[in-house]
Image: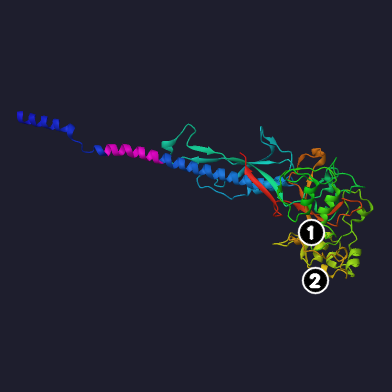
Amino acid sequence: MMYKFDNYIKILKALPRDEAGSVAVFAGFFAVLAIGAGALVLDVGRMGVLRSQMQSRADAGAMAGASQLDGRVGAQVRATSLAVNAIAQTSMITSSASTLSVQNVDFYSAIEPNMVAAIGDEDSKFIKITLDPKDVKYLFEPLLVTASGTQQTFNAAATATSEPFICHAPPLMICDPAESDATLDMSLPANFGRQITLKPPASGGSAWAPGNYGLLALPDGSIGANDLETALAAVTPEDCYGLDVGTAPGVKTAKVENGINARFDVVGGLANPAPNVINYPKDTDVELDSSLVMGSGDWNIAGYWADKHGAPLPTDLLAATRYQTYLYELGLEFARNGHATVYPITGALPSGYVVVTPAAAGLVENIGNSDDPDFDGVPSQAVAANGYARRLVQVAVLQCQAEGVKGAHEYPTNGNYLEMFITEAVDGAPAGGIYAEIVRTLTPNNTPDFHSNVKMVQ
């Protein structure tokens, strides 16, 4: 019996020292921790990716939409369309529909110190994009259930603005006639080809606004007559105008005449004329009444053609504008839809446009038999480097009534610029009058000199 008892004692003493299976216990414990940590890392990573995807989608939509905030009619519609369709982005992380879609598009006229909702296209300065919220379910629900349940909801929003600016534009402005008469909206294609007294003559004409006769300060703020003359005469004026421009009061008659007439090969004038320096007739009603803000666009093209070319008006030029006639005389192929013009032709044309091909290249060379540039249109000096565009000017359109334009101050353009064709040299009597024909509105989408800096603001 003593022998058996001693064996039991030996067995009991040996038990605490038997470590077989203890590693499995610890391994199981740490495995549970590792799985939990792995699940946490994986779900946190998924949520981080979704958050980044949604914010990128919102940013892209806001910046795309902001590029259309040019203050023109239809700006909100165009901005919304681009914002909604900016990126067709999806995510495989979300619990429901994978498309990262736009929930709301809002427009504001100001965001500091408080956000002020825009009234319409003109004062839409900022666009805010808000995405539809997305849910993410935890992959390891038993381990990661939170107070909010087994999933988490994510939102994303972004606000952007546009800062349009135009480069190489001369210091010219006009007041928007549509403020008094909506039918005179110069952005309407129906008004293309109509003549504007861009700068009223010193005598016989009235100012656009108190003290302002159609001139802008230079981008650096200069309003001196000599500086304005240099800028008006420049082939490619330096610097760029932003959303706000300064006005330059006063007539500055002789300097304006010299600057504009650099395009016309005037004897004793400045260099770099256009390739065709012919003077085109005024609109019939402007000829009769110089006080008209805008002519009808009806000018004696048939009489002009018979006088200069000694032939009937080509069918392609029936009811053409002076700008279209100018291109035709230069032998440049263009497209027209009534008074609307596309030149140069790049890509597919909009509906309704027809291509006009001149009868001969350089038709201007065949005008008359005179060496007088005022008759045959052929300049005696070397032609400006920008060729046909030498007679085109970019003009800021100000809301003079709404903004109270007067004297030398800064005023917003809301990105409203027109391209206009100078129809004739500035006549010395009465001095200072600039006559131009509306060609088209300018936007960052249709001219390389008009740009739009888009930036995120929130």
In the image, farthest residue toward the front: 268
Q: Position of residue 3 (x, y in %)?
A: 5, 31
The residue carrying mark 2 is: 360
Main SS of the magenta segment? Answer: helix
345 displayed left or right of 401: left
114 displayed left or right of 20: right
Viewer-nearest residue: 21 or 380 = 380
Quick check: can you spot residue 95? no
The residue carrying mark 1 is: 271
- Mark-to-mark CA distance, 1 and 2: 28 Å
In the image, farthest residue toward the right: 288
Residue under the point 54% across and 39% down: 154
Q: Position of residue 110 (x, y in %)?
A: 69, 36
Magenta stretch in the rendered image: 24-38
Asked whether 451 falls inside the magenta stretch, the response is: no
Q: Residue flagged by tag 2: what amino acid is it?
A: Ala
Quick check: can you spot residue 216? yes
Mark 1 falls on what kind of element?
Answer: loop
In the image, residue 223 sits, relative to residue 327, either above or below, namely: above
**Disc 1, disc 2: CB below 8 Å?**
no
Q: Earlier in the sequence, mark 1 or mark 2?
A: 1
